[in-house]
Image (tube, rainbow, N blue to C red):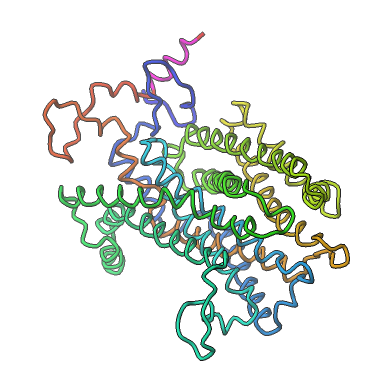
Amino acid sequence: MASTVGEIDNTLDIPGQRAPLVLGGHDFTSVTDTVSAVWEARRPPRAWYIAFAIAVTLLAVLGAMIGYLVFNGVGVWGLNIPNGWGFDITNFVFWVGIGHAGTLISAILFLFRQKWRTGINRFAEAMTIFAVMCAGMFPAIHVGRIWLLYWVFPIPNQMAMWPNFRSPLLWDVFAVSTYMLVSLLFWYTGMIPDLATFRDRATSKWKYYVYGLLALGWTGSSRHWHRFERAYLILAALATPLVLSVHSVVSFDFAVSQLPGWHTTIFPPYFVAGAIFGGFAMVLTLAIPARSLFGLKALITPRHIDNMCKVLLLTGLMVAYAYGMEFFTSWYSGNPHESFISRARALGPYAWAYWTMIACNVVIPQLLWFRRVRTNAWGAFAVAMAVNVGMWFERFVIIVTSLSQDFLPSSWGIFIPTWVDLLTLAGSFGLFFTLFLLFCRYLPLVAMAEVKTVMPQATLTHAATPHPHEHVPSKRAFDYNPDEYEAHKRKKP
């Protein structure tokens, strides 16, 4: 008798046994049925409607705030002298960081053949696309005269102006746009076999033609699979350096300046570790409700959540180390301005933001040392939500504290966000979740084709290589058998 999903804890590693990555006694057909059921349902769950209504409301608020900004100027924000950056660039850096984990799961874990990625990589990739869209909005609207935004592009114009190619702000344009393009291609390429499945299961002509167009004529032939796997591997190889480079480039906006608190070589690795930290927290934030809402607990298992929590714990320790090194380098440099900024962050007017950051990014993630927290989906969700809050405050602390108290006390000024700042921040979450909820409803939420490759039915045992789509039962299939796995667990002392 097959064990039910609720009875199986696949987080333990037993010598000689492979923990199953797909639970519930699924075969290839039932995996397809489970994922397709989200799209084929006449109506999504009521919780989807509630979440979508909230997200669309916040999206409308964002549109109103951008319109208000265009008509009135950036003075509606809390910016002042010397705080030329406030919530705008804080939100930009936050959303760019959120977009990191998707490509990490997709590309780096794929190259390292980490099979557990297959249950979560699809919506992690989607998260990347939507987060970068949210991030790209803020540099566009913070320039003030949005109707003259084309001045920033290297094209001829009536002012005979050209961008300053030595400016680190222009580096962002190339880094983020390249990251967006490669991530979009990687996400879409990986979806092609699943879009063809939707095409073949379509019950109306418009669905058949729309998904048929998106599937690019996929037939599942050996040639198509060969080309697909080659293209997927190449895109993974291209995306991997982007994961490490794009947030390093964003950190150069700060590190190449002379401002105390910014001028430090620790920023590139610090920002990359923080981006992965915050990105994995957002993946957990999305995955845990999605698996419950859409009946995907057999595909997004406790082992997936446990592994993500371990990555979250590791990168959280890196971030905590970076926080400590900031204090050490400011003291060791002997620079009074650097030492002052370090003390001001912890004890100055923004101490409340600094200690919120420490609590959320350093203290609360230590709960993940406990297996009981990692294997409790909603306990992991609570930690992930705390990290999301902490990573936003990290960007706020870095940007605002250094700007508000620079070299000259005569130019100091406190940044206080206005209601427009706060509603724009909330609206950016509305944009993100609106796009994500639409993705959940109309596109394959889990990579069906990739999930099937980690199931025992996909393991080949022939000495000679059979047809690439002849799925032969593995003689080691017992390694994945949930019943036998549970029996071995019970034998453990």
Task: Find residue 1 and report its image quarter.
Answer: top left
Q: Which residue lies at the image location 51% right of the left edge and 45% below the top edge?
A: 287
Q: Position of residue 233 (x, y in %)?
A: 30, 47
Task: Find residue 355 and report its image quarter.
Answer: top right
Q: Position of residue 94 (x, y in %)?
A: 61, 56
Q: Position of residue 192 (x, y in %)?
A: 29, 56
Instruction: Work out whether residue 98 or residue 296 is closer to the camera in this orientation and state it.
Output: 98
Which residue lies most toward the bottom here?
A: 158
- Magenta-span inclusion, residue 373: no
Instruction: Work out whether residue 180 or residue 404 is closer to the camera in this orientation and state it.
Output: 404
Instruction: Work out whether residue 381 or residue 28 is closer to the camera in this orientation and state it.
Output: 381
The span picked out in magenta is 483-492
Number of callouts: 0
Relative to 132, residue 222 above or below: above
**Most common secondary structure along the magenta stretch:** helix
Residue 372 placement, left or right of 220: right
Q: Which residue lies at the image location 48% right of the left edge and 11% below the top edge?
A: 492
Q: Which residue lies at the image location 53% right of the left edge and 59% below the top edge?
A: 131
